């Protein structure tokens, strides 16, 4: 019956293969499993994976969600790092002299400072390393990536924030992540909805 390997191990190996820079392609595998054991591979197909720019050209004018391999670069030139959110809904609020107005709740509400961090993402599928796009990381996603609470980060001076960015860039900017991206038309940039398990290069 050939080699039976644990399904988890199979998925892990497959993930490694897909994230390997030498394979700028997607492998589509249909397999049978029983009680978490791989029984047989039924088909195997290589699909060329478009770059983010090709997705943008393809989906012109349509918002879309896409998982894509990218590196993340924190941008010290970028001023958008955190903002205030309504505590009753996930919407950003406008603050005026300590008062917060939520456009969704359509009333004065309480607000809480959290991340709306604009970063650069570098397409790992594209051969062109200059091929970057703007993306926003909100709340938990940014907190997990920066490993610091928004309130603590916002209390740092601009200079120490930039130093902090440089440290994180040194540690993480070479890592290829699988990002769950949502493309929004309003601002013409991506939202990073999830950073999926990573493999170091
Ligand atoms: Zn609200």
Image (spheres, grey):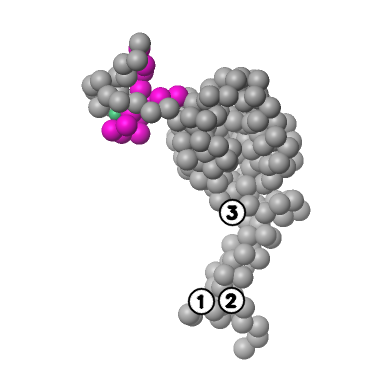
Instruction: Say what secondary structure mark 1 lies in.
Output: loop
User: In the drawing, what numbered circle is on residue 83?
Assistant: none
- Give x and y (percent) for residue 4: 61, 82
Q: Earlier in the sequence, mark 2 or mark 1?
A: 2
Q: Specify whether residue 89 is in view.
A: yes
- Can you tell which quarter of the image residue 166 is in? top right
Q: CA distance from mark 1 to mark 3?
A: 20 Å
Q: CA distance from mark 2 to mark 3?
A: 19 Å
Instruction: Relative to 34, say whether 78 is above or below.
Output: above
Check contact, mark 2 vs mark 1: CB within 8 A. Answer: yes
- Give x and y (percent) for residue 44: 62, 68
Instruction: Say what secondary structure mark 3 lies in.
Output: strand
Q: Which residues are magenta?
A: 83-96
For the point 57% across and 40% down, the residue is: 147
Q: Earlier in the sequence, mark 2 or mark 3?
A: 2
Rendered-image quarter of ligand 1: top left
Instruction: Relative to 198, say whether 188 is above or below.
Output: above
Which residue in the structure is indicated by mark 2? 6
- Give x and y (percent) for residue 174: 72, 42
Asked if residue 179 is among those painted magenta in the image, a careful observer would answer no
For the point 59% across and 54% down, the residue is: 197
Which residue in the structure is indicated by mark 1? 36
Does mark 3's beta carbon lie closer than 8 Å to ligand 1? no
Front residue (pair 168, 151)? 151
Front residue (pair 90, 71)? 90
Q: Earlier in the sequence, mark 1 or mark 3?
A: 1
Q: Specify whether residue 125 is in view.
A: no
Q: CA distance from mark 2 to mark 1?
A: 6 Å
Q: Quadrant of the N terminus?
A: bottom right
- Can you tell which quarter of the image residue 88 is in? top left
Which residue in the structure is indicated by mark 3? 197
- Left or right of 93? Residue 80 is right
């Amino acid at each position: 019956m050939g080699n039976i390997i644990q399904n988890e191990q199979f998925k892990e190996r497959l993930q490694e293969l897909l994230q390997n820079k030498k394979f700028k392609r997607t492998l589509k595998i249909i397999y049978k499993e029983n009680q978490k054991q791989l029984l047989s591979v039924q088909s195997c197909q290589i699909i060329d994976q478009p770059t983010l720019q090709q997705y943008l050209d393809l989906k012109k004018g349509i918002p879309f969600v896409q998982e894509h391999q990218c590196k993340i670069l924190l941008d010290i030139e970028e001023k958008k790092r955190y903002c205030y959110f309504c505590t009753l809904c996930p919407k950003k609020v406008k603050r005026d002299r300590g008062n917060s107005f939520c456009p969704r709740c359509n009333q004065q509400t309480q607000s809480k400072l959290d991340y709306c961090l604009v970063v650069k993402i570098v397409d790992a599928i594209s051969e062109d390393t200059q091929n970057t796009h703007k993306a926003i990381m909100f709340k938990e996603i940014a907190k997990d990536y920066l490993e610091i609470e928004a309130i603590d980060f916002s209390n740092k001076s601009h200079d120490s924030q930039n130093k902090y960015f440089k440290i994180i860039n040194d540690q993480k900017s070479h890592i290829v992540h699988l990002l769950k991206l949502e493309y929004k038309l309003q601002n013409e940039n991506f939202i990073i909805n999830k950073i999926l398990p990573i493999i170091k290069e």
